Image: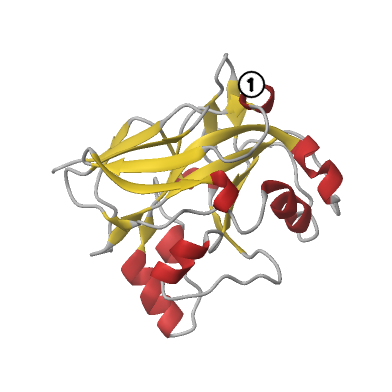
Amino acid sequence: MAYVFDPPPVPALAVVGGGLYPVRRIFCVGRNYAAHAAEMGGEVDREAPWYFTKSAHALCPSGARIAMPSGTEECHYEIEFVVALGGEGQGIGREAALELGFGYGSGIDLTRRDLQAAAKASRRPWDTGKDFDKAAIIGPITPKSAFGSIGSQTIWLDHNGARAQQGGLNEMVWTVDEIIAHLSTLYHLRPGDLIMTGTPSGVGPVAKGSRLFGGIDGLAPVSVTIRGD
């Protein structure tokens, strides 16, 4: 039976060395750096990681020039270490969790902070604060064999040429293997699933003309420009 309209193309990311990585889902870890949790006026939940999601169609390739996100007066940047899964499973233990990984990337999570704050204050879902067009800017995926072990690699972001965020991957409250293992108790994870693992402190607002450029040691950088029109 024919579709009533043409389905959209599969969202995908470039892979360092060649090929395309098709994106299925985007999971995001909340408050995974203690300093960022503090600057947002919260505390780290050390009982278990917690998550929000972005649609795969929120994906935006690195290097894009995008319009200022609509419906917001306060849109923030957040640099993130992104895990791209290449295996599948449910109820995975920590010892096998990293085997699900295909590779890693540098990402920028855009957040309509005012909408998020208003939703939190009224105890409503804050999907519109996180899941919107071009809200997940992600650079090319580096295969995990080329990246090596996750350790104290520096994660950083420059806003208009000035350093705004910097930290180490070893500062994450929940490690990548812990995140994958825990997330697999809630979902059957599959190839194409991305996990944005949280941001260090220093998040701040963008404006028309903002240039964001960030990265993680050993990975391709990520960048985006907010158009001035």
Which is nearer the eye, 214 or 108? 214
* Label 1: element kind: helix
Which is nearer the eye, 44 or 113? 44
Query: Is residue 127 shown to the viewer in this render?
Result: no
Please determine whether, in this image, residue 124 is positioned above or below residue 73.
below
Q: Residue furthest bottom?
A: 122
Which is nearer the eye, 6 or 2? 6
Quarter of the image holding residue 144?
Answer: top right
In percent of width and height, residue 182 lies at 76, 58
Which is nearer the eye, 26 or 196? 196
Tally of numbered discs: 1
- Residue hosting label 1: 146
What residue is drawn where x is 20% and y is 41%? 227
What residue is drawn where x is 43% and y is 85%? 122
What residue is drawn where x is 86% and y is 51%? 93
In percent of width and height, residue 101 lies at 72, 36
Query: Is residue 212 shown to the viewer in this render?
Result: yes
In percent of width and height, residue 84 lies at 63, 37
What residue is drawn where x is 53% and y is 29%? 13
Q: Which quadrant does the N terminus fall into? A: top right
**Residue 3 horizontal side relative to residue 219, left or right:** right
Q: Residue furthest left?
A: 229
**Residue 95 horizontal side relative to residue 137, left or right:** right
Quarter of the image holding residue 100?
Answer: top right
In percent of width and height, residue 113 lies at 35, 66
**Residue 97 horizontal side relative to residue 21, left or right:** right
Name the amino acid type tagged 1.
Answer: Ala
Please determine whether, in this image, residue 115 is positioned above or below residue 92.
below
What colour scheme has been applied to the protein in the rendered image? secondary structure
